[in-house]
Amino acid sequence: MPKPNPRVGEVWLVDGGYVAKTRPCVIITGRPSEKDLDVFTVVFHTTKLRGNRWQLTIPKPFLSDGAFDVQEVFTTSPWRLERKLGELTSTEFRALLDRLAERFGI
């Protein structure tokens, strides 16, 4: 099986390591260089809506009703990326990054 080659803003099904649970995630970091660790940072999509400011709803036909939760940031090996589901538009991805910046206070 070839190693996945995800791009920033794409949504992938990711094995988060939670008792055989896979969830959609958006890729928020680019391909690492040869000197970097071979990892990607992602934000999980959840169907458990809490109505808080850290959940960003971005309706997509390839996602169940839910939201990206910027409290659930995860760094993972590319081998845990199972398959690409789709991608966010540049406007949607910018909104996600803005919410992450707010969350991290940057």
Image: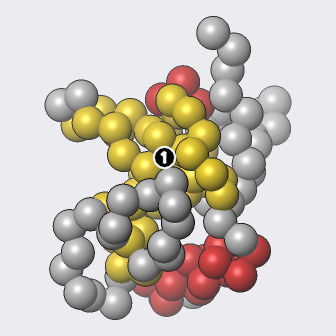
Residue at the right extreme? 34
Quadrant containing the N terminus is top right
Residue 12, image x, y percentages = 54, 44
The residue positioned 34% from the left and 67% from the top of the image is 65
Q: Is residue 24 above or below residue 98?
A: above
How far across and down, in percent of the image, does residue 4 sit? 67, 28
* Coloring basis for residues: secondary structure
Q: Tell me the element at label 1.
A: strand
Instruction: Inspect this view and state whether residue 29 appears.
Output: no
Quadrant location of residue 15?
A: top left
| Residue 50 as seen in the image, left or right of residue 27 | left
> Is residue 33 in sight in this rendering?
yes
Please name whichever residue, 58 or 80, is drawn nearer the observer in this view of the structure.
58
Residue 91 on image: x %, y %: 71, 81
Residue at 73% of width from left, 33% of height from top? 5
Q: Is residue 26 left or right of residue 89?
A: left
Query: Is 35 above or below relative to 49?
Result: above
The residue positioned 36% from the left and 46% from the top of the image is: 23
- Which percent across, then down, holds residue 3? 67, 20
As drawn, 94 above or below 77 = below
Q: Residue at x 52, y 66 (%)?
A: 60
Around disc 1, counting alpha carbons within 10 Å, would you say few (fewer than 14), some (14 to 19), or many (20 or more)?
some
Side of 76 relative to 38 (left or right): left
Amino acid identity at mark 1 = Thr
Considering the image in quadrants, where does the C terminus appear?
Answer: bottom right
Where residue 57 sits, quadrant-wise, is bottom left
Q: Which residue is mark 1?
A: 75
Number of dots carrying numbers? 1
Q: Residue furthest front?
A: 61
Say above or below: 41 vs 94: above
Snapshot quadrant of residue 16: top left
Left or right: 76 in relation to 89: left
